Amino acid sequence: MGGTRLSPNAPRTLSNNDLIKVGNALFKFLEKGNIEAVSLQKTYDRTQVDGLTEAYNKTAFLARSEELFRRAMLTETPLSLIVFDLDNFKLVNDTYGHQAGDYVLKEMASVIQNSLIRQNDFFARFGGEEFVLMLAGSPLKRAIEIAERLRSTIDKHPFNFEGQPLHVTISLGVATLEANMTTAQQLFEKADQASYVSKRTGKNRVSTI
């Protein structure tokens, strides 16, 4: 640090922009609120957050799901996943235009993020009109209750695009961590398959397999 060799286990107060070399790695200390630190944080956030809905994106979900999966396996605690997408979304785009579709995606995500998820839940846009919600510490029964609350809330929410009321519904699939699973991808695939069951059996419902 500053050309000074630090003694092991000796506390040292760092100053803004101090450089610390550890082996071949060089670290830079930035105080909270530092312009460079804020800029770097914003750049990182843009790589992790979906620009339209402000939910986490697929990249963030894939990384976080593996982390939560490994933690749940090690601690033998419940982990459940809800996969859902909008019903008849193509019809909304075809009838009212893509701006209406964007409005529905953004409004739905806002409703979920502001009133339906808990602090430890992880909500992300997986792609297109498909979303995921990871529930650390929630067994299957609790996850199904949460999924039903999501379904009911979106079904009743007054979506209105430029004076045109839109009835929006979602189809959901729920899965929970099982002893024979070895990757987070297996958990996702099971919840995703369950969401297709909801689609095939009438939409606007919650399914498990």
Image (cartoon, rainbow, N blue to C red):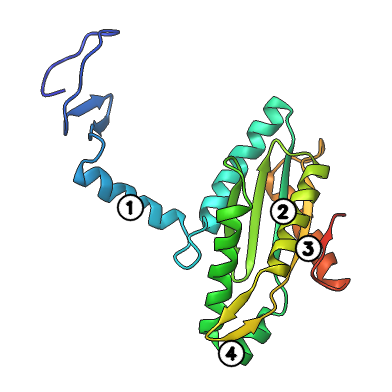
Do labels 4 and 1 touch, CB within 8 Å?
Answer: no
Whole-angstrom CA distance, mark 2 to mark 4, is 28 Å
- Residue denoted by label 1: 42
- Quote the CA–CA distance across marks 3 and 2: 9 Å
Whichever of callouts 3 and 4 sits on the residue coming sooner in the sequence is 4
Upstream in sequence: badge 2 or badge 4: 2
Q: What is the crowding at mark 2: few (fewer than 14 residues within 10 Å), some, or many (at least 20)?
A: many
Q: Amino acid at mark 2?
A: Ile
Camera-near label (4 vs 1) is 4
The residue under the point 25% across, 43% down is 37
Instruction: Count neighbours of disc 4 (C-alpha within 10 A) and say few if under 14, some if 14 to 19, many if 20 or more.
Output: some
SS class of the residue under badge 2?
A: strand
Q: Which residue is mark 4?
A: 96
Q: Is residue 40 above or below residue 156?
A: above
SS label for mark 1: helix
Q: Position of residue 123 (x, y in %)?
A: 59, 53
Residue farthest to the left?
3
Distance between the alpha carbons at the discs numbered 4 and 1: 34 Å
Residue 174 spot, x, y in % from top left: 78, 53
**Looking at the image, is mark 4 or mark 1 earlier in the sequence?**
1
Mark 1 and 3 residues: CB-CB less than 8 Å, in contact? no
In the rendered view of the protein, which quadrant contains the N terminus? top left
Mark 3 neighbour class, 10 Å CA radius: few under 14, some 14 to 19, many 20 or more: many
Of the two numbered discs 1 and 3 on the same chain, state the one appearing first in sequence. Answer: 1
Task: Identify which amino acid the numbered label 4 is placed on.
Answer: Tyr
Amino acid on which the number 3 mark rests in the picture: Ser
* 35 relative to 41 in the view: left or right: left
Q: Distance between the Cα atoms at labels 3 and 4? A: 26 Å
Mark 3 or 4: in front is: 4
Q: Which residue is mark 2?
A: 82
According to the image, label 3 marks what residue?
195
